[in-house]
Image: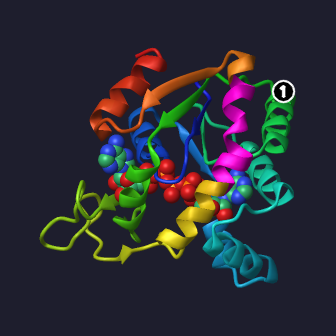
Amino acid sequence: MTNIILLGPPGAGKGTQARYLVESRGMVQLSTGDMLREAQTSGTEMGKKVAAIMAEGKLVTDQIVIGLIREKLQGGAEGGFIFDGFPRTLAQADALAKLLDEMDLKLDAVIEMQVDDEALVARITGRSTCGGCGEVYHDQTKPWPADGKCANCGSTDVQRRADDNEDSLKTRLMEYYKKTSPLIGYYYAKGNLQRVDGLASIEEVRKSMAWIMGE
Ligand code: AP5
């Protein structure tokens, strides 16, 4: 069993690689972004508040996301967990360490996906997702098949996220540098940190991650 964290700014490729690891290694992806988008559809007061915070590009409170992760960890994962977009603050990192400890689980690697800011704008503004299966596409680098049907599930439901615009991205990047990037030093000091060149092709990034994970 391997438990890993994917760490990187918005658009670094965390979700793309996590999907591949789910398919190829049977790992369980814990994406707090996906969980929060799901919470938005509940129509509750909490869901509405979360939607407004996310559209602006700010971080949702530690209390909410730690609660979500705690709940999902109870389900267990034979192939290991991929923490995608969590932790994002030092308080979340400490909470995760405590939760893993309580469950007798260990963290095998924290993989920092390094991408420069200019590339992120192009990646975020060109992204779309399949509403049927969650497959991630990009207008230039991974366009939808010409027949308009998702290559994975055949759905024609092309979705674009409310926070995938240049204004929200500026705030998301600011939040990343202020609150999340200190985790790089935190995990380096713990001896968990590994780095991959997130600017390489999707396939090259896959290979680097496989190497880190001992394949
Ligand atoms: P979240 O959903 O986690 O978004 P994010 O971190 O901003 O990351 P993205 O999903 O935008 O990017 P990604 O790295 O997964 O890239 P992808 O693989 O899609 O969070 C959204 C919001 O939720 C936050 O802003 C916050 O409000 C809230 N939130 C979530 N977690 C929270 C937490 N823990 N605490 C507090 N608040 C939280 O790739 C992007 C594009 O690039 C795609 O089109 C893809 O095809 C393309 N691409 C990927 N890899 C490559 C490559 N190697 N080469 C070329 N193109 C590539």
Tell me which segment is drawn in magenta.
Answer: 175-187
The residue under label 1 is which amino acid type?
Asp
User: Residue at 70% across / 27% down in the picture?
Assistant: 185
Q: Is residue 35 visible?
A: no
- What residue did someone put label 1 on? 101
34 drawn magenta: no
For the image shown, how many numbered marks are present on the structure? 1
Badge 1 marks a residue whose secondary structure is: helix
**Relative side of 28 to 97, left or right:** left
Q: Is residue 193 above or below residue 68?
A: above
| 205 shown above or below 18 | above
Whole-percent x, y for residue 144 in the image: 22, 65
Is-magenta flag for residue 178?
Answer: yes
Quarter of the image holding residue 126?
bottom left
Rendering coords of residue 202 (x, y %): 31, 40
Q: Is residue 195 visible?
A: yes
Quadrant location of residue 34? bottom right
Assign the N terminus to one quadrant of the image. top right
Seen at 46% across and 53% down, the residue is: 11
